Amino acid sequence: MPNPILDGSVFEALQREIDVNALTVELIKTEVAKLDDVLRNCTALLSRVHSTAPSQLSRIIAEYYDSGYAQKLTDALSGLNNIIEGKPVYKYKPIWTSSLQQVIYVILYVHFLSRVSDKTCTASEFAELLATPKDVSLTLKVKCTMTNQAIQYTGSHTDDQESKVVYDLNDLDGLWFGTEEYLHAIISLINELSRLSVNLVTTISTTNALNKDQSDTVKENFTLPVMINTFIKSLQSGFMMLNLKNDSLRRRFDSIKYDVKKTEDVVYDLAVRGLL
Amino acid sequence: MTLAKSPKNEVPNYQPAAVVTATADTIGQKRVAEAHEEVACSKQARGHGMNAPRIDSIEGLFQYCRGSLDAHHDIREKVIKAGRDVTNASKKIIFALQSVRLDSQGKVLFTASINSNIDKGYTIIQEKLQSIVGEIGVNFSHGVHPQKRSKYQHQISGGIQEFVEAVSLECYLREGRIITLREVQNRVSEWVKPKGDNPHPSEYKTIPITIEDFILGLFDLTGELMRFSISNLKPVTASKEVVDPIPSICTNMLNVMREFKTQFDQLNLTELGRNQDLKEFAKKRAVFEASLQKVEFGIYGVFMRINEMT
């Protein structure tokens, strides 16, 4: 018989809530651990980019696809999605956010590398060096709150058309990423590219030293560090447009300027030596 | 404000839960036919006089991000402000309720001015909750998880807890029982539902009262019960004759608090772990235990003095 003064069922409900919560956290952590495993494999492979000459980059990209990592990432994410579907996403989001950012970063990096190793890509198409939220969403098969924007802006439109920015969807179920995750991934990309810029000079120089008897057409040139410099500068100016509050995004944004400076120094050093 | 609206059928098919654009004010009035095309929190981006951002350029992409981040911060601040106002109004209601006095029979006496202060408080809370239902409301009708919540739940939690404290204290003083979560939820849902002829529950959103917020609100209530019973701990007298050594409401309050303790002690909290929502429990529980002992000690004192006099 229920207590007429105090309905004790709410405490039972709370207990259930606590138990379900503990169980859910366990399940999510298991899935995130699987995702992190694949991520470690990916980053291990991609770290070899730093000791690879630009002309050989396509090999690493090919290896990335042949190894099935792309598929494994999608699988791990879909596993995570299955666990969190129907559950209060915001409650558990902190558990997977950083891994999800890392996955997006991998996609951005691979996209960048495939673009620059593609000979038909010219340095002027900077937008093409960056995978759009829609690209990321389609590659990972993960929903994205920015996707509709991507769809509507790639089509033709007139300026008088009214539209809204969907920031957030309380009822969007399952796994998704939004502006913040994407921007964090871009910052990771900038961090990585500034390191790559330095290492490219080394790999290009050593390759050219080995091939010094060959004709000039076989030799590698130093366009890629210049391209990286221009690319991350345009990303930096993009970030400067944002009104960042005092959060993790702001702190990481503050670090970009050192990356930009590093790539600028590389380009300067190349320029003064007449290597460009 | 120049962003382009996309036709719904452009939603790619890999995306089961389609994203549909809408503003908060269209929610509840216009319902998208497909249940999965649910819109929750959306907001028109601040224009900043820019042209329609083209997300296929880096600049356009960042313009989009700027709108999106600005909208996020605006909503966040709006919710925080509303939450603070709800807390304030709730505190005023509680203050009014604490000024309730007992009549010669030990019954609770609500004066007209107290009632009007309480109503004023509720009017403010209703307005504030209505103002943010578009931002933090969720729809309960799609068989979703009962603990569904919005991104901004954390920002409103404090206000909700204070509100639970106020309604539960009022309910206790008027009816002598602890209000249920369902009653509080229904009250809020009634407040925030759109005007018009009886819309179906699936057609509007409500602000969720989570179990955590409800129980934490009840913890706060025990503090108020303690305050009320301590300040009313004096013999009930009728024509100089002691009817009751202490008002029955004080004994009732003590019983309720003991019932709370029984319930709390049965909870297995070892699994609390890192859950943000439940972190406050340990703290509030300690305060509650202190309140309970204070009431017990107060009643003990009264009886001790009675023994002394006889």
Image (spheres, coloured by chain):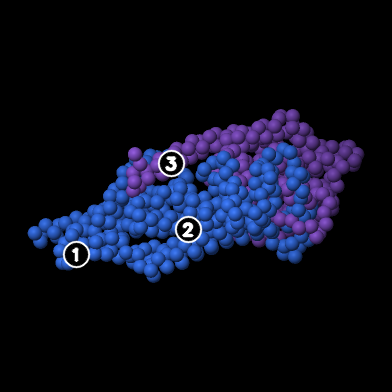
Chain colours: A purple, B blue
Q: Secondary structure at mark 2?
A: helix
Q: CA distance from mark 1 to mark 2?
A: 42 Å
Residue A255 in sight here: no
State the image coordinates of residue A143 (x, y, percent, origin top left): 68, 42
Q: Is residue A130 left or right of residue A21?
A: right
Residue at coordinates 41% horizontally, 59% vertically from top-left?
A: B166
Number of numbered discs: 3
Disc 3 target residue:
A13
Chain at tag 3: A
Disc 3 from disc 2: Cα separation: 22 Å
Q: Position of residue B306 (x, y in %)?
A: 13, 59
Q: Residues within 10 Å of mark 2 (few under 14, many from 20)?
A: many
Tag 3 secondary structure: helix
Q: Are marks 1 and 3 on the same chain?
A: no
Q: Quadrant of residue B91?
A: bottom left
Q: Is residue A93 left or right of residue B110?
A: right
Residue A111, x across and y down, in percent:
75, 42
- Mark 1, mark 2: which one is toward the viewer? 1
* Residue at the spot of label 2: B159
Q: Report in which chain the residue with disc 2 lies.
A: B
Quadrant of the snapshot with the N terminus of chain A: top left
Q: Which mark is residue B238?
A: 1
Q: Nearer the viewer, mark 1 or mark 3?
A: 1
- A35 over B230 or under it: above or below: above
